[in-house]
Amino acid sequence: MLSLRLARGAHPLVLLRRVLVALAAAGVGFLLLCSLGYAVAHPGQPEESVVRLLWCAVPFAAAVQFALAVARTDPATRPRDGLDALGLGPVRLSLLAAGTTAVSCALGSGAALLVYLELRGDLGGTPVSGSARRLLDGGHALPWAGTLTLLGLLPVVGAGVCALVLRPREPRRRGAHADGPTVPPRPAPDRPSYAGLPWGVAVIATGLALEAYVGHAPAPEPGRLLALPGRDGAASPGLLGGWLLASLGLVLAGPGLTHWCGVAVAAGRPGPVRLLAGRMLQETATRIGRPLGVLCAVASGTLAAAEVYGAGWEPSGPRPFGPLTGLGAAVVMTCVTATAITAALDARQLRSGTTAALLRLGLPASLLRGAAAVRTTVLLAVLAPLTWVIAELTALPLLR
């Protein structure tokens, strides 16, 4: 009930984020239902049914990440003065964020079920009823236990991740013996944002090397469900592991790349615009670098997949990318892009006090807009070519 009351009085932008979470959950729920429908309609093909279910893991993870980003930036769940007296301390607020996430995901999953049943023709009453009956394996009744289990995964996992990540963390207290004086706790030093850059570079190099070692087969067959090139012409675990390692390396290197972009912008004798842009990039490297790394990893994988599968795509032959694959790719790209934008808006909100102080000192607003433009341009100039290079290096061993 409290989550609903907070939703009624929330800012329109906050409501829009929650609606986007519900839409992402609807897309993931629809894909899960499609996998279940295929398994029910083809009981003699369990391997392909499992593969279809596994392909839903990437949109599922992207939706959970986006739901966590929205819950983290929700102003209604941030600690404020006076809430402890009402029984809404940090623990209760983290549980409130988890409950709000569960409600949004449950609404999206329920909408996905209605749309899926309507397109299969199980409900009727609208012009689109049964329009995708063949594609969605209509005519086979869905087991309600399996349906509710699959649709309940995202609300449960999303709420659990929010409660786990947003829970309050108590600093460790160090002291002397019981009969000695107590030593005041020392704040633990923050981990530098660029600490993961060497690890990211090493993981990317390992992934590319693994792909170069296992990817000596021709382009994949477009008609295969999981048509990954490999030594035996089938799905190669080594190739898939190389792709995952390269993507993980980009995620790890994101904060470090953002930090050093700020260092490069503020190098030498910078003017006010470059100085502000560089300092802000360094301060927010950890907050916005990780979502940007995920976005670059997804974009790199998409470019590599399009190039590899396009090499074996005959205009008159079968299509390697069907409508459900397009839906999954759209859910992933939308979620990671929205997560990066949410992180950028959250970083801007955290800088609001500093920005207001600068404006009170007489700093023109045009200078702040110029610093924002410089930050955006530098990040695009560094991350876009890097994403393209990683995609080309990923696809190169597969096109020999």
Image: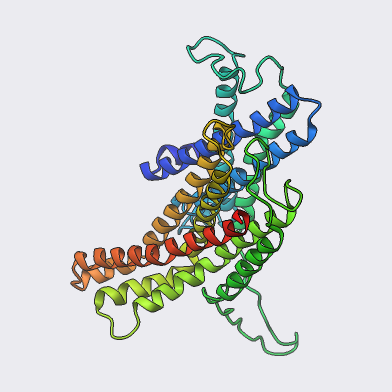
Question: In the drawing, does residue 268 fall left or right of residue 338?
Answer: left
* Corner quadrant of residue 180: bottom right
**x then y, percent, for residue 300:** 52, 55
Image-based side of 222 in relation to 213, left or right: left
Disc tally is 0
Give coordinates of residue 5: x percent, y percent.
46, 38
For the view shown, which residue lies furthest in the right direction? 44
Does 128 sit above or below residue 386?
A: above
The answer to whether residue 4 of the structure is visible from this angle is: yes
- Can you say which quadrant of the picture contains the C terminus? bottom right
* Rendered position, 146 above or below 183: above
Q: Tell me, what colour scheme is on the image?
A: rainbow
Task: Identify the image quadrant of residue 318.
Answer: top right
Residue placed most toward the observer, 162 or 47: 47
Q: Nearer the viewer, residue 335 or 46?
A: 46
- Vertically, is 104 above or below 255? above
Residue plotted at (57% across, 28% down): 112
Q: Report which quarter residue 36 is drawn in.
A: top right
Along the line of sight, the residue nearer the viewer: 72 or 23: 23
Q: Residue furthest bottom?
A: 180
Could you say where residue 52 lies in the image, as x and y percent from the top left?
69, 37
| Residue 166, visible in the rendered structure | no
Q: Residue at x 60, y 67 (%)?
A: 204
Q: Name the quadrant of the N terminus.
A: top right
Q: Position of residue 344 (x, y in %)?
A: 41, 58
Q: Would residue 7 be found to the left or right of residue 47 on screen?
A: left
Residue at left 63%, top 48%?
219
Task: Say which residue appears at 56% left-offset and 76% top-offset.
Answer: 195
